[in-house]
């Protein structure tokens, strides 16, 4: 069960526009997806769009496949100035205890184009994505 604080986080940071689906990679260097996070400068939060450039394979857990579990995980993280995912955490998971490890490993494999603000690479915080797990995918 998600506590009230986590629901507020998800409502304010995930639902308004941070969810995305990965699209297939058709050509080298193509943007797989765009997510939004925040960079803070002088106490002001600045919205930064971040382009996902590479991702490893999503591993469907064998036990979940055997029992045909369907679920989703919401993962929150930061994106470093070098484009690497920093400190991913599980924000919500349904059903709990099945897909978390696979989702974290998957998100850690992602590489973004280095986020920029006014020509400088910056660290972006408060990024969240929803990862769906379905046996036939």
Image (tube, grey):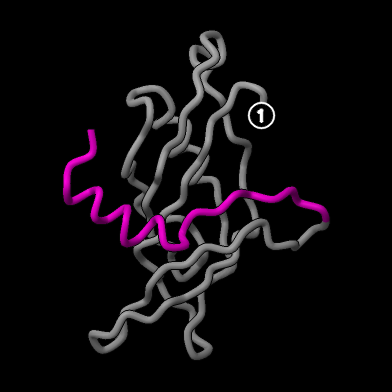
User: Which residue appears at 27% of the width and 56% of the height?
Assistant: 9
**Extreme residue in the right direction:** 27
Compared with 132, 130 (above or below) is: below
**118 or 48: which is nearer to us?**
48
As displayed, is residue 3 above or below residue 14?
above
Residue 114 is inside the magenta segment: no
Above or below, 121 against 25 in this view is: below
* Magenta region includes residue 16: yes
The residue at the far left in this view is 4
Q: Quadrant of the C terminus?
A: top right
Left or right, residue 78 beside residue 106: left
Q: Position of residue 104 (x, y in %)?
A: 43, 39
Which residues fall within the magenta stretch? Answer: 1-26
**Residue matched to label 1:** 137
Q: Residue at x 34, y 52 (%)?
A: 87
Of residue 46 and residue 8, the one placed in the foreground of this image is: 8
Please tell me how crowded label 1 is: few (under 14), some (14-19), or many (20+) other residues with Cα within 10 Å.
few
Q: Left or right: where does residue 77 sit relative to residue 4?
A: right
Residue 113 quadrant: bottom right
Q: Quadrant of the N terminus?
A: top left
What percent of the width, then of the height, locates residue 51?
A: 59, 66
Kind of element beneath mark 1: loop
- 98 to 131, vertically: above or below: above
Measured from the top left, where is residue 123 in percent x and y? 40, 71
């Amino acid at each position: 069960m998600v506590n009230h604080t986590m629901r507020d986080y998800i409502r304010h940071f995930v639902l308004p526009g941070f969810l995305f689906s990965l699209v297939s990679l058709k050509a080298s260097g193509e943007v797989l997806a765009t997510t939004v996070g925040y960079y803070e400068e002088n106490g002001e939060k600045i919205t930064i769009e971040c382009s996902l450039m590479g991702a490893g394979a999503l591993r469907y857990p064998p036990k979940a496949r055997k029992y045909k579990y369907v679920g989703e995980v919401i993962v929150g993280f930061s994106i470093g100035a070098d484009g690497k995912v920093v400190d991913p955490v599980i924000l919500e998971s349904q059903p709990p205890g099945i897909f978390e490890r696979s989702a974290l490993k998957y998100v850690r494999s992602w590489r973004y184009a280095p986020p920029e603000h006014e020509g400088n690479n910056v660290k972006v915080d408060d990024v969240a994505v929803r990862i769906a797990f379905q046996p036939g995918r």
